[in-house]
Image (tube, rainbow, N blue to C red):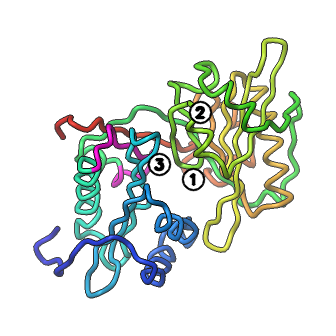
Amino acid sequence: MNSDSPEYHIRPLEGSDEEDILEIAKHTWDGHDYLPFYFRRWLENKDCHTAAIIISNKVAALANLRVIEKGKTGWMEGLRVHLRHRGKGLASVLTRYLVRKAVEIGVQRLRYTTASDNTASLHLAKSIGLSPIHEMGIFWYSESANVSWGQELKSVIPADPSDILTLVASPRLFQKGIIMHDWKAYDASVEAVKYLKDAKFWVAGNENGVMSISIGNERGEGEKNIWCVSIHALSKDHLLSHLSYHFATARDKFDGLFVMYPLKYTEDLKQIPWIMKHHREREELMRMILLEKVLGETS
């Protein structure tokens, strides 16, 4: 921390911190932070190791380390710093604290995701030895109720999680053997389907079998409910079919749509005007980057 920073200590989050959490979330992503919806879940989950930096009896920064995949992975999430305390090095202090906690717990690797334009997060990741290992495209849209769009090219049908179990290990469907969904990543396995217990699944295929899978779940962001979707598809037609299905779902039932998709379809999606509306200033779609550090490596 900077030399002029106030005294602090680090402790786990507590239920009584909720007011501080809400205050921090109010100034994150224009008030569309998911943190208020996950905070209580972390406290109730024995595999979560929360950490808060306390200054003057208030939460100044927080983060969570969630142990997944039978203890193999320490998933780093929810790193936040109060607006008043940014620029003091608190994010670095908290991140290094979680790295030490991960070593103490004995997980094999650390992982987390961030957006391609989050230079501060990427710099912090590099400083502790995390490296990019996978990327997917992302975009979001919050005015779907005002747009009419559909492209029914392939039949997209609901799938039971038990049906998905036979597909998760497919190297065709999941690049690098990784399922990415809702800012998270899992090795494609039976365990991944268990972690996605709050999500629903859809598939589409042809005579060669299943050619695409999409995963969807509701996510709270501030006062809005967003339909969060990831699409894993082997062709543009299949991608657009799933996108059309989920666009209609978001338009009818939710306040917005967030989509993850394979990067190879970026140029195809940029041809759809409503997708680019929220990204017009940069004329580019963003990427979600998965970073990893195998513990035992030097940083």
Label 1: element kind: loop
| Residue 38 located left or right of residue 202 | left
Image spot of residue 57 (x, y percent):
29, 87
Badge 1: how crowded within 10 Å, few (<14), some, or many (20+)?
Answer: few
Q: Which residue is mark 3?
A: 115
Image spot of residue 47 (x, y percent):
43, 55
The answer to if 240 sits in the magenta stretch is: no
Disc on the earlier residue, 3 or 1? 3
Image spot of residue 52 (x, y percent):
33, 71
* Residue 120, label in figure: none
Instruction: Tell me what residue is drawn at x 28 percent, y 44 percent.
Output: 106
Q: Which residues are magenta?
A: 105-121
Tell me the distance, in whole angstroms, between the alpha carbons under discs 3 and 1.
17 Å
Amino acid of disc 1: Glu
| Furthest residue toward left | 3
Q: Image height check: is 63 above or below 27? A: above
Badge 3: how crowded within 10 Å, few (<14), some, or many (20+)?
Answer: some
**Is mark 3 in CB contact (under 8 Å) with mark 1?**
no
Of 210 and 2, the residue lying toward us = 210
* Residue 190, label in figure: 2
Label 2: element kind: helix
| Furthest residue toward top | 208
Of 72 and 296, the residue lying toward us = 72
Disc on the earlier residue, 1 or 2? 2
Of 278 and 12, the residue lying toward us = 12
Amino acid of disc 2: Val
Of marks 3 and 1, the one in the foreground: 3
Q: For the C terminus, which image quadrant? A: top left
